[in-house]
Amino acid sequence: MDRYHKVSDLKAPGPRLRAGGEVDSYCGRCKLMLEHTILAMQAGEPVRTICNTCKSQHRYRPHPPGQGPAPKRSRQKASGTWAEAPKARPPKAWQEAVAGKDLSRSEPYSPQATFETGQVIMHGKFGLGIVMGTKPGGKIIVVFEDDTRLFVHGRGQGPGSKGSEK
Ligand SMILES: [Zn+2]
C-alpha cells in the first residue's frame, strides 16, 4: 500500500489532488466556490467531490457556471481588435468609384434633378458621392465614402410629374 501511494503522488499534477484530499470546487447547492473532499479521481483530475459545507455529492467544477478562464479572455481580445478596425479604411466600392473621377466637378444632389451613372454628386448630408447606377422607379444608387445609398431623382421633370405641388 505504501508503494502504491508513492506512485500516485508522483503522477498527480497538484500536491493535494487525490481521492480523499481537498479541492476548491463550485457547489451547485451552496452556489459558492467551497472546499470539497475529492471522492474520485480520473486522469489526474477530480471527477467526483463532496461539499464540505452541505455534504452534497456532485461533479468537480473548478469554476462557477459561465466563468471559464481561457475562452472568455480570448474572446475579449478578438473583439478588441475588431473595435479598432472598422473605420480604418474606406470600403473598396468607394475606392473603385472615385478612380478617374474629377471630384471637384460635382453636381448638387436634389430629388428634382436627373443623374446619370458615373456622375459625381454632392449631397447636403452625406457629402461627395458617385452615381453607380440607376434603378427603375426613378432611383439612383450612390456610393459614398462610408456606405452605398439609394436616392430618388428626376422628380421635377419628364412626363408623369404633372400636378406636382410643394
Ligand atoms: Zn455545498
Image (tube, rainbow, N blue to C red):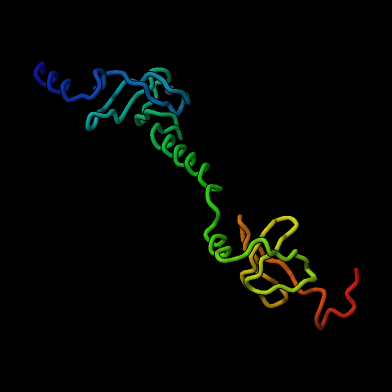
**Front-most of residues 78 and 126:** 126
**Residue 77's x, y, as percent?**
45, 37
Question: Residue at image x 66%, y 70%?
Answer: 119
The residue that appears at 61% across and 69% down in the rendered structure is 132
From this view, report whether residue 152 is shown above or below residue 34: below
Residue 50 to residue 160: above or below = above
Name the residue at 81% across, 83% down: 159
Residue 149 x %, y % = 65, 63
Q: How many marks?
A: 0
Q: Quadrant of ligand 1?
A: top left
- Relative placement, left or right, of 152 versus 81 is right
Position in image of residue 6 (x %, y %): 13, 18
Residue 48 x/y as whole percent? 31, 29
**Quadrant where the image shows the N terminus:** top left
Q: Is residue 35 something one can see in this rendering?
A: yes
Q: Looking at the image, which is closer to me, 1 or 80?
A: 80
Quarter of the image for residue 143 reads bottom right
| Residue positioned most to the bottom | 159
- Decide if residue 153 is on the left or right side of residue 70: right
Residue drawn at the location 71% of the way across and 72% of the way down = 115
**Left or right for 152, reference 82:** right
Q: Residue furthest left?
A: 3
Quadrant housing the C terminus: bottom right
> Does residue 97 appear to the left or right of 66 in the view shown?
right
